[in-house]
Image (cartoon, rainbow, N blue to C red):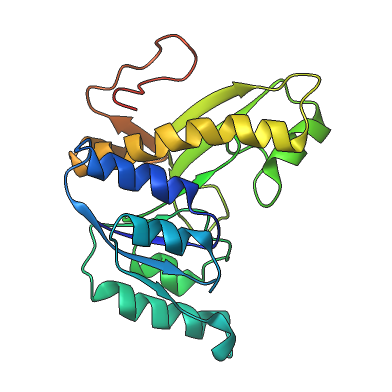
Amino acid sequence: MKLVVLISGRGSNLKAISQAFKEGKIEGKISLVISNKKDAHGLEVAREYGIPSEFHDPSIFETREEYDRHLVERIKKENPDLVVLAGYMRILSDYFIESFEGKLINIHPSLTPAFTGLKAQKQAIQYGAKFSGCTVHFVTKELDAGPVIIQAVVPVRPEDTEETLSDKILQYEHRVYPQAIKWISEGRIKIKGRQVIVEGARYGTLPVNPALEDF
């Protein structure tokens, strides 16, 4: 399994995924990390793990699609099995999504289809939701609405703030994202319409977060 990872920020999910490769929980490697932010801490995370990393400046391109066409050309040189969005804070063009259809995944800090878009944790608190969490999903043209690979459930306490809920959800992001990648690398993912089936996964177990086999 060869990955290209796109980041914009601190790279905490990149670190969790990189550690899973380092510990042998996932076979393969991350061949390249790309950031659209020059000062993203995730670039330092990539260097710590010895992963090639590059900053690609979107400001030198006139349109979003021109930038995405540039990225697609660069990514395809790596011939990745999977393109992973790990805190990548740009809306992708249709061209980018079509270029990696079925090989492009993302993690979102809510139980989709609830609370898509920015500040999902704040949305959950303002709505009065009793549970939130995170979702790993295939990327489609509809924002944060692709077929769900795995979700982790986190209770929302009355005293929670956007920051405390974000921190609780992030702990599960670091488990479910590597788990989803492992499943894909093992060829265990089957898609039937919108339903994603993981062969051999332990669904329905307690606690409420299912099938966290190794993470």
The residue positioned 55% from the left and 90% from the top of the image is: 60
Q: Quadrant of residue 211?
A: top left
The residue positioned 29% from the left and 62% from the top of the image is: 51
The residue positioned 23% from the left and 76% from the top of the image is: 77
Does residue 199 appear left or right of residue 176 in this picture?
Answer: left
138, 21: nearer the viewer: 21
Q: Residue 37's x, y, as percent?
A: 55, 71
Above or below residue 36? Residue 5 is: above
The residue positioned 32% from the left and 42% from the top of the image is: 19
The number of discs equals: 0
Does residue 145 appear left or right of residue 176 in this picture?
Answer: right
Name the residue furthest top. 206
Q: Quadrant of residue 30?
A: bottom left
12, 198: nearer the viewer: 12
Q: Quadrant of residue 33?
A: bottom left
User: Does residue 1 appear in the picture of this structure?
Assistant: no
Does residue 99 appear left or right of residue 165 in this picture?
Answer: left
82, 38: nearer the viewer: 38
Q: Residue 214's x, y, as percent?
A: 29, 25
Does residue 124 appear left or right of residue 143 in this picture?
Answer: right
Q: Quadrant of the C terminus?
A: top left
Above or below residue 135? Residue 86 is: below
User: Does residue 197 appear in the picture of this structure?
Assistant: yes
Above or below residue 72? Residue 138 is: above
Q: Residue 6's x, y, as percent?
A: 43, 62
